[in-house]
Amino acid sequence: MIERRAAGRYGYNILRATVLALAACAAYPAFGEDAQPTATAETDVLPKESRIKGDTVLKPIVVGKGSNAATQGYQPISTVTATRTDTPLLDIPQAVNVVSQDVLRDQNARSLDDALANISGVAQSNTLGGTQEAVIRRGFGDNRDGSILIDGMKTAMSRSFNATTDRVEVLKGPASTLYGILDPGGMINIVTKKPEQTFSGKTYTSVSSFGGGSAGFDFTGPIEGTDLSYRVVGDYKHVDYWRNFGVNKDWVLSPSLTWSGDDTEVTVSYTHEDYSVPFDRGTIFDLATGHAVNVDPKIRFDEPYNISDGQSNLASVHVKRDLAEDWKLTFDYTYSINTYSDNQARVISYNAATGILTRRADATQGSTIYNHAVRTDLSGDVDIAGFRNELLFGTSYDYADTLRTKLIRCANRSGFNINNPTYGTLPECTTVSAADSDQTEQISTASIYAQDALHLSDQWILVGGFRYQYYDLMAGKGRPFNENTDSNGTSFVPRGGIVYKMTPDFSLYANAAKTFRPQSSIASYYGNLDPEEGVAYEVGAKFDVLDGITANVALYTSDKKNVAYSSLDPVTGDTVVKTAGLVRASGIEADLAGEITDEMSFIASYGYTHARILEDPDYAGNEPVNVPHHTGSLYLTYDFGEIDSRGDSLKLGGGVRAVGRRPGINTNAYYLPGYMVADAFAAYTWKNDRPLTLQLNLKNIFNKTYYTSSIGTTALGNQIGEPFSAVLSASIQF
């Protein structure tokens, strides 16, 4: 273990040297001698595609240094997530969905789950008692699977969505060619707020019907007399948990600074977050009936010390330099660290006849996860042999280290009755389990990749690329340390796609790609875990209608072999990790967003997923846990505009989100029932020198009891959705 940690430090020294070398290259003045000045903020320009269409002129896209240039209201316009170049959505041979800042604000989204409820084919996976973001995309996904990125970079953050979030972009299907180790379901990119060259500011506060509330601010603008612009975001939250005990506490502070030269832009940012959240495993399903136990959903089966608390830090540097002849160099470096501890009264078994639980006091103390990520891209938009080529060449290096120092385990204790709960009978534990402590996982990857979007004509675009990746992986646990994974290797990951633009506003596309993901686990094994390998195929259509609505329809099929899943050893009761031979997910998705009229906006989605375990000695023929057949959503808003002579304005909206039934356990012995939940909001703005907005958001209007996910290994942990809530917020614009 000591030798491997030394190797990790050696890898960091290599990384540091790489960073310095690449930064020096980016700063070398000869690269930018012939470069044109960058576009100023809020400049209307025609994209390059419209310049090659002869007499056909497309509507201009607003390009600026503000973070909202990729969207107009609810409508997504372009994205850098899919191709790592700023590309119109209709030119991308892959489904990309965007939840804009306007949608997040109107819905008062408080979590990544809130934002992703607007996207087809997405559902919640095992959140580890609400302490982790865990998302299934197109049938695949789990917590800590590396699929949630911040500004396109992998991090150690367990809670990526916060007050710094500007929008959420979801890239469906394989993304390993550009982003490395991922599964074929896709990835989620949290795009953060950036400094802008025009001053704006906002302060806000809110109160919740659960008790407590939040307050915060967001200011950005230029620093007069300099080439600098700034942004600073702060947020504090203290909201009572909706069940019978617990509090959600969180505060975030995030300053960022951008220097804008003639041909170079440098942005540095830092985010600090302190958090304390309930560690809540939810409720129990009775295997005899297939239904949740008949207990008030507000009643918890654990103890008030069930808390996960910690702090995270994220520092990043982004450098963009315009080079000669339509070439651009970008460099990104991100360092992140998350330290946390948690305590829980874990439910071990349930006696359906008596209502008695057997529980055990567990804890994880002194956990640290940190990540270094560095990436350099060289992109060019050039003509070769008379054809337009959007070229991308890049290198990346990632190093991630997870260490859970002390694992606390005490003896099982019975006597807690769910029908007449008495808390305080199971004290916190202090006994360190030597066999379970020092849980360690270290992985480093180094890659080169390339991509070309070849414009054969005004209508045909071919996209192809590859990634060559090296990885080194170690994992284990125990005192003395037992290394149960020590592997390294290489992989070649290709992708290809084609776009046919029937009109400037309608395109057909197809793509095929592979994925690769080395696996490890600190849990026990039934044999070694082979790397996951995936392949996916997709066809679809994209179109802009009514001069304000963007839509995407896709059909896909994805295969992944060697899928890891957790199970319980029938003899020891320990969690073990196994792999399913082959899992297939196929489906159809439709996503629409934009403006129906100048006053009415909407975002809507529907997804059908058919997922099956095709080859496995235990679960062949079963459905993967937490994967619903159906997902859907619709949210409409109406902006009345000025409603009086003073210029006050009113905006109303509402909608529904729905998820079909899902298997709650690997054996498919029970299913979480499907649900549909309704939400609404109203916002009134007083037009003053500093406009004041009051907004009321109602969630789960009809107080539906529903279940969002399960732990998958037993019927003893099933997350419950929040009941009816009302949040009243007030904000002042500057």
Image (cartoon, rainbow, N blue to C red):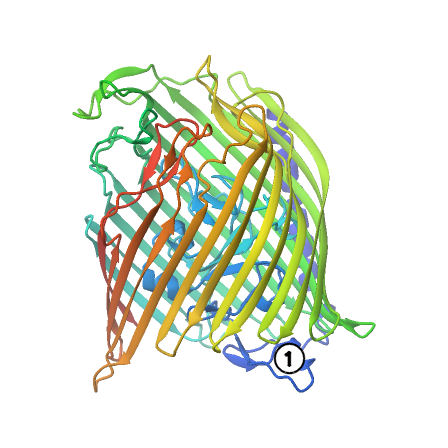
Is 387 in front, or is 595? 595
Where residue 47 appears, as percent x and y from the top left, is 61, 77
Image quadrant occupied by the N terminus: top right
> Viewed as shown, does residue 444 lie left or right of 357?
right
Name the residue located 22 percent from the left edge and 18 percent from the top edge: 354
Dot 1 crowding, Cα within 10 Å, few <14, some 14–19, many 20+: some
Q: Secondary structure at mark 1?
A: helix
Amino acid carrying label 1: it is Ser
Where residue 121 appears, as percent x and y from the top left, is 48, 50
257 over 130 or under it: above or below:
below
Name the residue located 28 percent from the left edge and 45 percent from the top edge: 722
Is 175 in front, or is 259? 175
Where residue 355 appears, as percent x and y from the top left, is 23, 21
Name the residue located 33 percent from the left edge and 14 percent from the top edge: 411
Can residue 734 be seen here?
no
Task: Determine which quarter of the picture holds residue 431.
Answer: top left
> Viewed as shown, does residue 301 lie left or right of 635?
left
What residue does disc 1 label? 50
